[in-house]
Amino acid sequence: MSSASAENSSVLSDGSSSEEKEALLKDSTQEYGTQGDSELESFPSRTNGVSNFGTIMHIINSNVSTGILAMPVAFSHAGILFGTVVLAMLAVLCVHCMQILVKSSHHLCRKTNRDHLDYADAAEAAVKFLPASTPNLCKAAKYTVNTFLILIQFGYCCVYVLFIAKNAQLIVNQYIGNSLESSTQTYSMNIQQYEVIVAVFLIPLVFIRDMKVLAPFSMLANITSVVGLIIILYYILVAETLQPVSRLPLIKSWAEIPLYLSTAIYAFEGIGVLLPVENKMREPQAMPSMFGVLNVGMTVVCVLYITVGFYGYIEFGDNSQDSITLNLTSWYGTAVQVLFSICIYISYAIQFYVPLNILGPVIAASRPAEIIGPNLFDYIIRATLVLITVGIAAIVDEYLNLLIALVGSVASAALTLIFPAALEILTFWPERKSIRHFWITCSKDVCIFVFGIFCFLFGTVTAMQNLIQQLSTTVL
C-alpha cells in the first residue's frame, strides 16, 4: 500500500494549477459524464489480475473473522427483533458505502490517469480537485485516512491477542485444570500471562516481511476458518435443540444500543482492504455492478452474520459470551477454539502487514535506522508494536466484547461510514452541475455521515464507560 501511496503522492500533491484542474475535470465530464453504468463498463481490464471468483473469496475471508464470532453477544445488547432487523439494514448501508468507495475510486482514477488508487490516495485525489484545494489539505486528507487505517489494523491486532488468550485459557482450564500445582503452592494463570505467552509466538511471525511467504499460512487460516464456521453452524442449528424464542426480549434497553451498533460495524472488517483487493482484479468493472463481485461476496457475508447472530442468540440468550467459541461445549467447543485460534494467529500477521506497509518508508528514513541499520531497527519496531498491542489487550483485561465495540466505534465507523460518504461528495462536487439528481445523492451522504458520527461518538463513550466500570469493579 505504501508504494502506491508514495507514487500517487507525487502525482496528486504537485501543486497543479487551477487551469490544469479545470482541464482534467472537463475531460472527465465529457468522456465519462455521470457516475453511471457506462462509466463502470469503460473502466479498463487488467492483465494477470485476480479472477472474479478469487476476489469474492478475498472479500468473504477479509470479513469473516472475530466480528462474526461476536454477533450473538451483539444481539444480547439489542434484542432478537431489533438485532435482526437493524443488522440487515446496517449490512445494506455498509455494502452501499463500500460501493460508493469503489465508484469514487474509479472516477478519481480517470481524473488522475492512474490504474488504481488506495483508500488514502483516493481521499487525497478527491480533495485535490476541489476549487479551494491546497497541497496541505490534500496531505491532511491522506494522513487522516492513513491514521485511521493504522488505528483499525492495530485495533484488530489487540482484539486478536485477547481472543487467542481467552480461548487458550479456556482450553487449558478444561483439559489441564484450573490451576497448575507445585509441591508447595497452587498457581493460577490469569489472562495477562496467557497474553505474554501469545506474544512470544507472535513476534517471530511478524518478522516475516514478504507476503508471499505468508501465502501458504493464509490458505491454512482460510481452511481453519471455514471448518470452524461449519462446526459452529452445525452446533447451533443441528446438534443442540434450539431454545424458545419467546424467552428473549424483542428489544433491549436503548442504553445498550450503541454497543450493539459498534460491534456490528466492527464486523465489517474488510473495508480497509477493499480497494487493495479491487486493485488486483482482472476485471475491476465487475466489482461495483448490481450483481457484481462486491454484492455477491457481501451477500454471503451478511447472511452468515445474521445466521450466527440470530441462532447464536436464540441458543445462548443473555449468556452469550464475548465470542461464540467460548459458549460451545464438548469436542465442538474445543475444535472451534483451536481452529479459530490458529486462524486468528495467522491473521494477526496479515493485519499487521498493512500498517507496517504505511509506516515502512518513515521507519526506513528515520535517524535510528541510519545508526543501527534499517533491518535491525525494523525488527525492533515490529517487536515493539507487538508488545504494544499485547499491552493494550492486557489493560482491557478479559472484556473482549468491549474492546471489539471500542475498535468498532472509533475506527470502523469512520472508515466504513463517515469517510466513504464524505468521499463521494468531495469526488463529484466539482461536477455537480452535470450530474443528475446530485443533491439527492449529497443529502443521502450527509445522512450517512451524521449516522456515522453518532456511532463514533455514542459508541466510543458507551464502550469506554462500560470498560472503565468493569475494570474498576475488577480492581476493587
Image (tube, grey):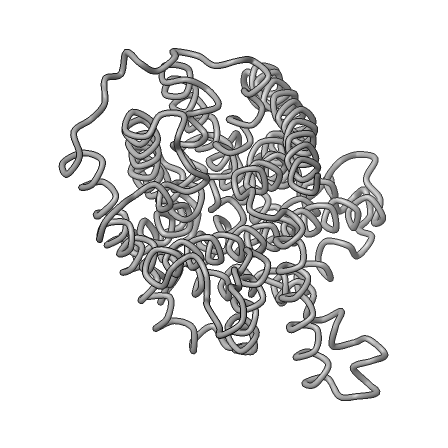
The extreme bottom residue here reads 372
* Residue at 48% from the left image edge and 37% from the top image edge: 98
Percent position (x, y) of residue 364? 74, 77
Q: Quadrant of residue 27?
A: top right
* Residue at 35% from the left image edge and 25% from the top image edge: 317
From the viewer's side, name the closer residue of 208 and 190. 190
* Residue at 31% from the left image edge and 26% from the top image edge: 310
Disc tally is: 0
Q: Quadrant of residue 439?
A: top right
Residue 105 shows in this picture: yes
* Residue at 59% from the left image edge and 17% from the top image edge: 255
Relative horizontal placement of residue 77, taking residue 18 as reference (left or right):
left
Against 418, is 223 above or below?
Answer: below
Against 323, is 221 above or below?
Answer: below
The extreme front residue here reads 184
Relative horizontal placement of residue 351, taking residue 309 as reference (left or right):
right
Percent position (x, y) of residue 118? 58, 53
Figure quadrant of the N terminus: bottom right
Against 102, is 359 above or below?
Answer: below
From the viewer's side, name the closer residue of 118 and 458. 458
Residue 431 shows in this picture: no
Figure quadrant of the C terminus: top right
Percent position (x, y) of residue 229? 27, 47
The extreme left residue here reads 238
From the viewer's side, name the closer residue of 369 and 410. 410
Percent position (x, y) of residue 268? 46, 39
